[in-house]
């Protein structure tokens, strides 16, 4: 049985910050993405897609095995950011990460369910506040790695984009992303910038109301995570590097899948496809499970790059299948980890994540 993500979020002491409206928006986004996916599948033709996917054959096993690399890299990124003296082995963290990603891959609602699950599992090993801070820092490192991946690949993608206006728009998006990343890191790393940002947001009506409703334990966990970032900048840089390498594996997967589909491309083209696809999915982050955005985004990217959109759709479907296959052991691990007795002395201090008033995981 899957954890109730909505219940986890709503009972983390948040006094209803419009969660019901947000959940309705998530469901609507998911259904809209599903409808779009159904339309594009019908437009291309199931028979044509089936013929393309059949070409992958046993190559799908290679695609499955390749996914072990980004899982390991993201696990290392997370482990690097654990508090000093709170060492947890990779063999323990990797199943937690896989369980969280599995939930994100199959759940039709929720944007941070996987992260909440990782906190609820990690807090069996270390105090809850430290667990929440480590997961939050890992998410920040992954975000920074994604932006760096986009920026590193954009020059190659821009060369391959034909339309002048589109090229200008993509370049502008890259500049905005770089500035946004710089601002986020500056605010996070500098107490002065962080305090200034809080003062500015405090003058914005909606932001101020939301900030007042954040419970003190959450603020304490966030403050602890930021203090870790400031005191251990080298660890954060190493974590970002590991996440950046994990994003690079997506281009390797694209290169292999297109070869299996009988449409081999060069390294530059594979990188351009992955960079532009990641940018589209990032802009549509609010769609749960990337429903429709993953498939439609790659079809659009292939069109932009002068390639065949149906091949881009086939590529996305192979990736979707890979995610589902990996989600199966992830969900099994989630249930096993939730039912496993806590180690003696496991800390439960700090932020309490509950479901219906009971501590998570069950």
Image (cartoon, helix red, strand yellow):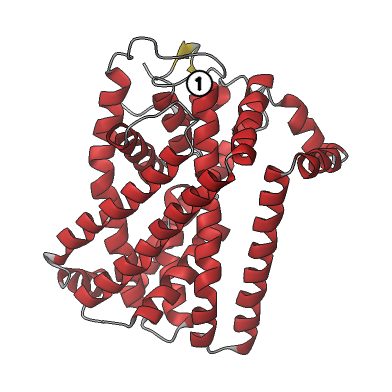
Q: Nearer the viewer, residue 83 or 143?
A: 83
Q: Residue at x 85, y 43 (%)?
A: 200
Q: Is residue 21 shown to the viewer in this render?
A: no
Compared with 184, 7 (above or below) is above
Q: Is residue 184 shown to the viewer in this render?
A: yes
Q: Position of residue 255 (x, y in %)?
A: 30, 73
Q: Residue at x 44, y 40 (%)?
A: 80
Taking the image as shown, residue 95 lies to the left or right of residue 127, namely: left
Q: Position of residue 89 (x, y in %)?
A: 32, 33
Secondary structure at badge 1 equals helix
Compared with 155, 234 (above or below) is above
Taking the image as shown, residue 145 lies to the left or right of residue 72, namely: right
Q: Residues within 10 Å of mark 1 (few under 14, many from 20)?
A: many
Quadrant where the image shows the N terminus: top left
Q: How many marks?
A: 1
Q: From this viewpoint, which residue is outermost toward the right? A: 203
Q: Nearer the viewer, residue 58 or 84?
A: 84
Q: Residue at x 68, y 50 (%)?
A: 184
Q: From this viewpoint, which residue is outermost toward the left? A: 58
Q: Nearer the viewer, residue 275 or 283?
A: 275
Quadrant where the image shows the C terminus: top left
Q: Position of residue 8 (x, y in %)?
A: 50, 25
Q: Nearer the viewer, residue 42 or 83?
A: 83
Q: Where does label 1 land, which residue?
A: 128
Taking the image as shown, residue 361 lies to the left or right of residue 163, namely: left
Quarter of image, res 169: bottom right
Q: Residue at x 85, y 41 (%)?
A: 204
């Amino acid at each position: 049985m899957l954890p109730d993500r909505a219940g986890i979020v709503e009972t983390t002491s948040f006094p209803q910050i419009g969660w019901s409206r947000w959940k309705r928006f998530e469901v609507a986004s998911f259904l809209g993405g599903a409808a779009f996916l159904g339309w594009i599948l019908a437009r291309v033709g199931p028979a044509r897609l089936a013929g393309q996917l059949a070409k992958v054959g046993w190559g799908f096993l290679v695609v499955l095995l390749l996914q072990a690399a980004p899982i390991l890299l993201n696990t290392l990124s997370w482990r690097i950011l654990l508090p000093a003296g709170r060492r947890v082995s990779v063999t323990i963290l990797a199943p937690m990460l896989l369980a969280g990603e599995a939930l994100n891959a199959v759940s039709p609602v929720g944007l941070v369910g996987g992260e909440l699950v990782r906190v609820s599992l990690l807090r069996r090993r270390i105090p809850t506040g430290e667990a929440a801070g480590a997961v939050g820092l890992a998410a920040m490192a992954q975000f920074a790695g994604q932006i760096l991946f986009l920026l590193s690949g954009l020059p190659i993608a821009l060369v391959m984009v034909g339309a002048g206006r589109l090229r200008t728009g993509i370049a502008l998006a890259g500049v905005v992303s770089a500035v946004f990343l710089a601002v986020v890191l500056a605010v996070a790393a500098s107490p002065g910038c962080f305090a200034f940002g809080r003062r500015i947001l405090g003058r914005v009506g909606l932001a101020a109301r939301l900030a007042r409703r954040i419970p003190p334990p959450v603020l304490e966990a966030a403050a602890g995570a930021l203090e870790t970032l400031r005191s251990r900048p080298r660890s954060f840089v190493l974590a970002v590097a590991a996440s950046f390498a994990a994003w690079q594996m997506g281009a390797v997967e694209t290169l292999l899948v297109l070869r299996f589909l009988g449409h081999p491309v060069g390294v530059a083209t594979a990188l351009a496809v992955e960079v532009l696809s990641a940018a589209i999915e990032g802009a549509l982050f609010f769609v749960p499970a990337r429903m429709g955005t993953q498939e439609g985004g790659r079809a659009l990217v292939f069109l932009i790059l002068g390639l065949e959109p149906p091949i881009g759709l086939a590529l996305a479907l192979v990736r979707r299948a890979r995610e589902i296959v990996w989600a199966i052991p992830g969900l099994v691990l989630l249930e096993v980890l939730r039912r496993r007795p806590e180690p003696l002395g496991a800390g439960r201090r700090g932020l309490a994540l509950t479901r219906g008033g009971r501590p998570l995981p069950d």
